Image (cartoon, rainbow, N blue to C red):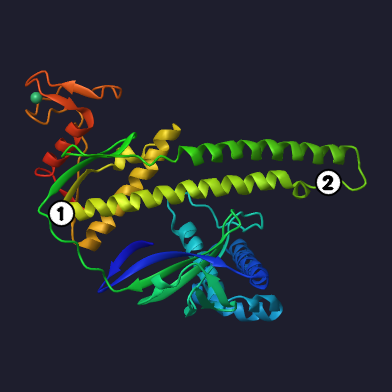
Amino acid sequence: MIFIKRRGNECAKRIKLRLYPNQTQQDQLWQMFGNDRFVWNQMLAMMNERYQNNKDLPFLSKFKLDYLLKPLKQEYPFLKSSDSSSLQVVNASLYQAWKNFFNDKTGKVGKPRFHSRKYLKNSYTGKSLVRIASRRYLKMPKLGYIKTSKTDILKDTKIKRYTVVLEPTGKYYLSLQVETNPVKPFKQTGKKVGIDVGVTDLAILSNGLKYPSFDGSYYEKQAISWQKKYSRRRHSAQLLCLQDKNRKVLNPRSLGSFLNWQKAQRTKAVYQAKVAAQRKDYLYKLTTHLVKQYDVIVIEDLKVKNLQKNHHLAKSIANASWSMFRQMLKYKCQWYGKKLVAVDPKNTSRICSKCGYNSGEKPLNIREWSCSKCQTHHDRDINAAINILNKSKACIVEL
Ligand SMILES: [Zn+2]
């Protein structure tokens, strides 16, 4: 469960639940995923044609696109099996994609593209009513009663929109955007802390505490090994297909008829999803813990440091964790009545936190050093965290 933003007295939250559709519902869902793609492609083809005929015509508004749904449904009755609000959501995102394309001055945003069936992730979003039918059962538009993982957390919430996803792992999920009453702020503790982020230790605190990075190496290794199996198996399947074709075999095999590469693809996705979920959970607990302990949390403004493209695996994982860590701290501080402050990262790892002497850059492998002026012995990361805390007194960008 994730809190996303606060609006007036109500708070928007995202909740993700598992769905257990029966066979009929699975068939229905498959049709609905396809309908979304179909409407997107139909509308897009029409808009492309309009654009080619006359480039100066204003593109169609969302309202006009919605108006076209009715004749489309008459022509293609299978569209009636979808929650009609989901087709409107498709129109809204298509409209947005065109708008982005037209308003783009940089020339980087391309025209919206057609959606292919080959997408691994299938989903649709609707805005109609979803309600709790009984314990672990929801009533959903067009699908009726459907089994889910839990319904308790939906109490006292208002569901704004829902998304059904079939993930590459073969599991179905329901992602809900809900509004709830705000939770109570945490007690004030009078404590202030500076936090430096790192690769081995994710968070290093100015008071000397260190919190290690999440260790997902087991599942990561599995994911990488299955990724390799997937590419190898797919490649050899491709070769066999080509062979059949060249030999003009009567019934040449297709790529889809080889199951082993598809299995490898699913297994890889399962492991990737596992690591991601566990890492998120770890960060979720850690940030709640920190926000509970401290009234003011000072971090580095990592815009530069964080967004640098990095090809080193451990580093890129750390990058992803840092931005999630920061994002979670940000909304939790808002949520629980605490303060998050970002300071300029310049020189935080070079200055002695005791006397302020700048002894220059130190290579990353130097974990401890002594100040050449006041002789204080420093742990590299803790010293940086103290500098970050000290900096908050001078230059403050409140988040
Ligand atoms: Zn010093």
Q: Quadrant of residue 366?
A: top left
Q: Are marks 1 and 2 in contact (CB under 8 Å)?
A: no
Q: Quadrant of the N terminus?
A: bottom left
Q: Is residue 164 left or right of residue 2?
A: right
Residue 350 point in image, percent of width and height = 18, 27
Q: In the structure shown, which secondary structural element does the residue marked by tag 1 occupy?
A: loop
Q: Which residue is mark 1?
A: 295
Between 164 and 154, the residue placed more toward the observer is 154
> In this view, which residue lies farthest toward the front?
135
Say above or below: 128 vs 265.
Answer: below
Q: Residue at x 35, y 39 (%)?
A: 213
Q: Which kind of residue does numbered mark 2 sit on?
A: Arg
Q: Which circle's residue, 1 or 2, is located before the other in the chain? A: 2
Q: Residue at x 65, y 80 (%)?
A: 71
Q: Is residue 119 left or right of residue 164?
A: right
Mark carried by residue 253: 2
> In this view, which residue lies farthest toward the right?
250
